[in-house]
Image (cartoon, rainbow, N blue to C red):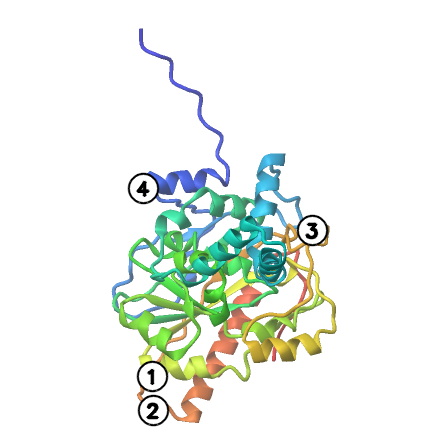
Amino acid sequence: PPRPAPPPRASSALDLSQGLERGVPRTAMAGGDASSATDNGDAPPLEFHEGTQPTREAGGPMPPMTVAEETLAMVSLGLLCGLPYMLVIFAPLLLIVALVMQSKLAGLMFAALVVASIWPIDHKPNLKFMRSYWFALWRKYLDYSWHCTVKLEKGQKHVFLEFPHGVVPVAQIVSASVMEECFGPDVMICGLGASVLFSLPGLRQFYSALGLRPADKKSIKKILSIGQQLAVTPGGVAEMFLVREDEDRLLFSPRKGIIKNAIREGAHLVPVYFYNNNQLFKVPQTNSMFEKISRKMRTSIFIFWGRFFLPIPLRHRIKMAVTELVKVQQCDNPTDDQVNEVHARVVEAVKRMYEQNRPEEIARPLVVT
């Protein structure tokens, strides 16, 4: 006899990755408004799933997670955020134990770290990895939502400017798993990261799988020349030291190099804002000494803590907004006036987007320095 149909499966954030693995688009049409999209003239837009991921009630509780889910999320995110500091501490200890105590196990572990730090990487985005269970788990942990109304012109270069950096750019990392939903499968967005990250075992493989490259002019040209879209965090390491609880501070006024490069490449600028990205960790308000060291090393030497005073992100609701497009005219040698004009337009676009998409429970003002 025929088997009875199974009961319908309850949907959850973790089901999103399963749908993508089967090739089913993760459409979410809660309140999407095509009229709010930026006009792109007559250029044909790329296909994408227009709309927004539904946001929970303002100030409401975070979605429940099972003990196993929350534990996995905390451990995996804690390793991702704390691995650089762990390596700084444990790699020298392994070497000392291997040499002084003649420990073969410690020697093998240290050798494995060395091999992993020099093993070739290709910087090619791994879509299967970005559609995996882990990203779905992190989205659920952060109650991750997005509002994307920008339409990209086919064949046009774009540079995504992501704000704010945060203590650790967790929101930017997780956003890699929803860009296909926002802009369709034909758009590949690849970012830049601190050069030192690509010398650290484990992290270099992780960021390479997201398509990241070292932050330099060569990488900018490489990404845009092969038909990919570029994503950068203009505030960089220095913006980490501006994290405050009572306001969202961006370091963008002196950051005009990326604007000049975008004009040279003829790339339109797409601001992206991640609400609550600065609230995922606690920081002391005085880090001036570490700021100087971090700038010289071009990486973060920073005191911060999260849950249980560990590098585990606090549970805060993350919302990504992509609703503005700043068009750019290509120029091989842009003048300071041209750069300043485009820069001012970007600042206004970021401020407008921040106010128009700010969740009701967030009262912090935006300050651009």
The image quarter containing residue 192 is bottom left
Identified at 37% across, 73% down, the residue is: 219
Task: State the separation of the CA atoms marked 1 and 4.
Answer: 37 Å
Quadrant housing the N terminus: top left
Task: State the separation of the CA atoms marked 3 and 1.
Answer: 44 Å
Q: In the image, is residue 272 above or below residue 56?
A: below
Q: What amino acid type should be assigned to the residue bearing mark 1?
A: Arg
Identified at 58% across, 79% down, the residue is: 295
Q: Earlier in the sequence, mark 3 or mark 4?
A: 4
Q: In the image, is residue 281 above or below residue 331?
A: above
Q: Earlier in the sequence, mark 3 or mark 1?
A: 1
Q: Is residue 67 left or right of residue 130?
A: right
From the top left corner, tell me how far across and down residue 321 is, in percent.
Answer: 50, 61
Secondary element at image label 3:
helix
Mark 3 Cα shell of 10 Å, populated few (<14), some (14-19), many (≥20): some
Identified at 52% across, 64% down, the residue is: 273
Pointer 1 residue: 264
Q: What amino acid type should be assigned to the residue bearing mark 3?
A: Arg
Q: How many marks?
A: 4
Pointer 3 residue: 307
